Image: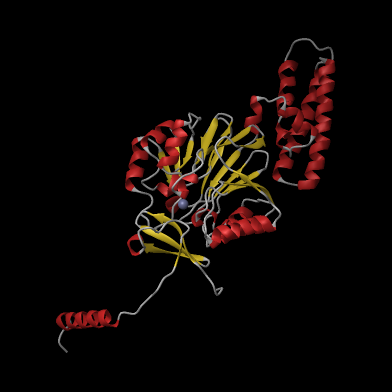
Amino acid sequence: MMTLSILALLVAVLLTVNSGWYFIRRAGKKARRQALYALLAFIISVAAAAGHPGGGPGPSGSLQSQPRSQAQAPVQAPAGTPLSRESQTNPSPRREEAGKLRVHFLDVGQGDAILVQLPGGQNILIDAGTNEAGPVVVQDLKQYAVAKLDYVIGTHPHEDHIGGLDQVINTFPVGKVYLPRVTNNTASYRELLLAIKNKGLKVTEARAGVSIPLGDGVQALFINPAKKNYDDLNDWSAVLRLTYGQTSFLFTGDAGSAAEEEMLASHQPLRADVLKVAHHGSRTATGTAFLKAVAPAYAVISVGKGNDYGHPHAQTLKRLQQAGVKVYRTDRDGTITAVSDGREVIMP
Amino acid sequence: MRRHELLVIDRFEDDMAVIEYGQRTFNLPRSLLPRAAKEGDVIKLAVVLDPEATARRKKEVRSLADEVFEKG
Ligand SMILES: [Zn+2]
């Protein structure tokens, strides 16, 4: 027991030093929290060591487990530190409590833009609205304290999804870019490719079976496009299924019925707590069979107020309603933020 | 605005075609486009003034106005 206490003390000291260093570098909220955890671990381990010098059974057992699991908290430190690497090989259920995953469905009028903030601090952007919405997306990202976009996904080359993406890429440091292997002839798409090229980035093809290496207990897998060719660019949409602990999200872009059929036929897991409804709630997406397979509790429709296309379509809203899904809409609710602690998703 | 802005069909939304023109898009009813038009097609718009139809419409509206306005 004595050696255990000393060990805990050592860990605590290490943590304090580590988060102190991190505190100085970032001076962020997270670092402050970590410093607090480390301090707590330190105090408890000192108390344990002092209280039970002879060891033996007693409350020390439970006390020991306390700082141990608290010590899991700094897992949220950036990858690469010895601590986070160690704890990644040694996952604990407490980990998920410590970090939260946030998904912001940005209100960009008619179009899509979704920011996913991972528990470890990484950022994923899925689409960036129209050309016109570009500055709004840039502003929003700054508001959510995004310093870098680790992953940028353009679901498909339609202007209401990739229009603002060049502005975003020109503004923020970008890690990897994922696009489906299909082009459009618009200036919007050309400007996106030019922005990528001018930044010296390369595009990774988004297609069914490709996963994004995220770590932190978060998995992200593309489940569409699965075929080599589709008639409609919408069906080319990069569809991403993201899971964190027991919770999951499905981002569908504008995938239509042809893509839905393909996804259903592939027997990949589709279930999700939160469904980003495809194609702004158009009638040609979110079919009954697909909806049944996803079985979401919540659905988010990214749609512009009074748009010219009749989105979202009444039939689609009815299908969602009949499936007992709670529907959120950016035209009514503005930006919608879903928060997952790995066990459940909290909606606004 | 640059000199050689192309008009490109970005996509179709139900009965609307979304046309990209420079930094903006506008909608055209699909029925105004050739049947073969598809996503990514570059289009030309030829706008022709129709003086006869303009005169007919003007006459029609004026006579309707004469009917509904109180006589002065
Ligand atoms: Zn769209």
Quadrant of residue A296 in the image? top left
Q: Is residue A139 above or below residue A30?
A: below
Residue B48 percent location from the top left of the image: 36, 77
Q: Is residue A322 above or below residue A144?
A: above
Quadrant of residue A87 in the image? top right
Residue A3 percent location from the top left of the image: 85, 17
- The N terminus of chain A: image quadrant: top right
Q: Nearer the viewer, residue A339 or A287?
A: A287
| Residue at 79% across, 24% down | A45
Q: Residue furthest top?
A: A56
| Residue at 45% across, 36% down | A262
Q: Nearer the viewer, residue A19 or A242?
A: A242
Q: Nearer the viewer, residue A124 or A45?
A: A124
Is residue A31 visible from the viewing direction of this image?
yes
| Residue at 47% across, 35% down | A263
Left or right of A155: which side holds A177?
A: right
Is residue A308 visible from the viewing direction of this image?
no
| Residue at 45% across, 40% down | A259
Left or right of A46: which side holds A195?
A: left
